[in-house]
Image (cartoon, grey):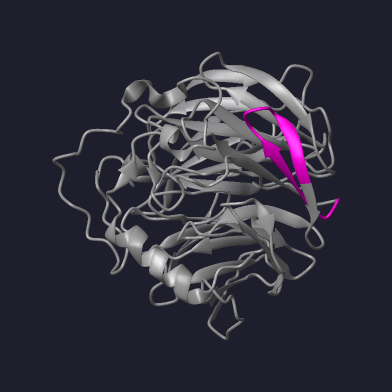
Amino acid sequence: MQLSPRLRRARAAAVVVGASVLAASCGGGGDVQAGGGDGDAAGAEGGAPVSTAAPIDVVPGMPPVVDPTNLYSETGPNMLADTVKDDAFRVYVPNERSGTVTVIDPTTYEVIDTYATGAIPQHVVPAWDLETLYALNNSGNSLTPIDPATGEDGKNIPIEDPYNLYFTPDGQHAIIVQEALERLMFVDPHTFEETDDVMQLECAGLNHIDFSIDGKYLVATCEFEGAAVKVDWVNRTVLDKLVLDDANVVEGGYQNLPMPQDVRVSPDGSTFYFADMISDGVHIVDAATFTEKAFLKTGRGAHGLYPSRDGKQLYVINRGANTFDVPSGPGGITIIDFATNEIVEQHPIPGGGSPDMGNFTPDGGELWLGGRYDHVVYVFDTQTKEFTHQIEVGRGPHGLTVWPQPGRYSLGHTGNMR
């Protein structure tokens, strides 16, 4: 089902006004129970202590940065907003080759529903106001809304070329990432009516985005030209473009230059991390100067990036190949320490695999990932550091989301929460 714009706006306002009112745990949510143990909850149930650092001057309308040293402080273990605490605890898996979404109950690890979407659903994305999830039907030129309270799908919404979806930090616009058209389209985040408010970017393979700590600019990856762009979204201007270092490009990959995929900002906002599936690692880029500082070799086909619940580590998802359609490659997870920018752990999938995008359970105890070319979903226990389950789904499972997620609002993708 799709909620009315009036109800959406009313509840979105409630999220902003009550940004600091967060549920202490999943226990009050009835249906919401996180699996896999305490995970990253070891740091403290209520998140990191409030910092004494200077406050961040955020873009107007954006919820405040509570801890300037950790912009993920409000996404700690089980810190669920009132808006989502009673939502059904589910995993939503878009199967791009089947044209379906598989719904999994993470408490039993069983598939409980499958419904048709449109052609090539790429990601399942939570809305800024946390009221709706959207399956992005890339070739179907539509979005399939999902009611997270019930897990039921609604009527498709027409939109051209929706490869990915993000939201401006103030919640006023949805950003449709139109990869084939190399542009960003800014639309109403409730109606999704197409507009002429577009930014045409010279960015071949435009696909993933993250925002600065103050919300005033975004960075986007250009996978087919080995580059990234820095964009002042408020004034709709390109600030800078970075061609990534090609020193670590491997032979025999899809292209002979870097191929950046996901991007994530560091907890203190000083650094951006770019996963590169051709260079098998992560480019570390200074946020202020937009220059590359270092490169970390992580594993074959570095692809997805997910900060731990305590904001201390970055999980790098290595898809296991430098090209496409390769099942059972040497895929796995690399864990980077944010404070030192050093690799602290490596966890290959036994027997190989093709892990792609996903997210953590609310408590951080498990990381769920789509196995894109093996047609399964992987479950990784963050305490035992073992892959505990492989669940068969449709063909081509890509950007799954676990719901609900801790946080006050969503910036998009599979649950980039703040």
Residue positioned 30% across, 68% down in the render: 61
Q: Main secondary structure of the magenta part?
A: strand
Query: Relative to the observer, which residue lies in front, 299 or 391?
Result: 391
Q: Is residue 360 magenta?
A: no
Q: Does 162 appear above or below 301?
A: below
Residue 180 is at least partly visible in this image: no
Query: Relative to the observer, which residue lies in front, 294 or 166?
Result: 166
Query: Relative to the observer, which residue lies in front, 202 or 144?
Result: 144
Q: Quadrant of residue 381?
A: top right
197 relative to 92 in the view: left or right: left
Q: Position of residue 157 (x, y in %)?
A: 68, 72
Q: Position of residue 415 (x, y in %)?
A: 53, 48
Residue positioned 62% across, 29% down in the render: 107
Q: Which residues are magenta?
A: 98-113
Residue 402 is at least partly visible in this image: yes
Q: Does 295 appear above or below 59?
A: above
Q: Position of residue 217 (x, y in %)?
A: 39, 63
Q: Position of residue 35 (x, y in %)?
A: 55, 26
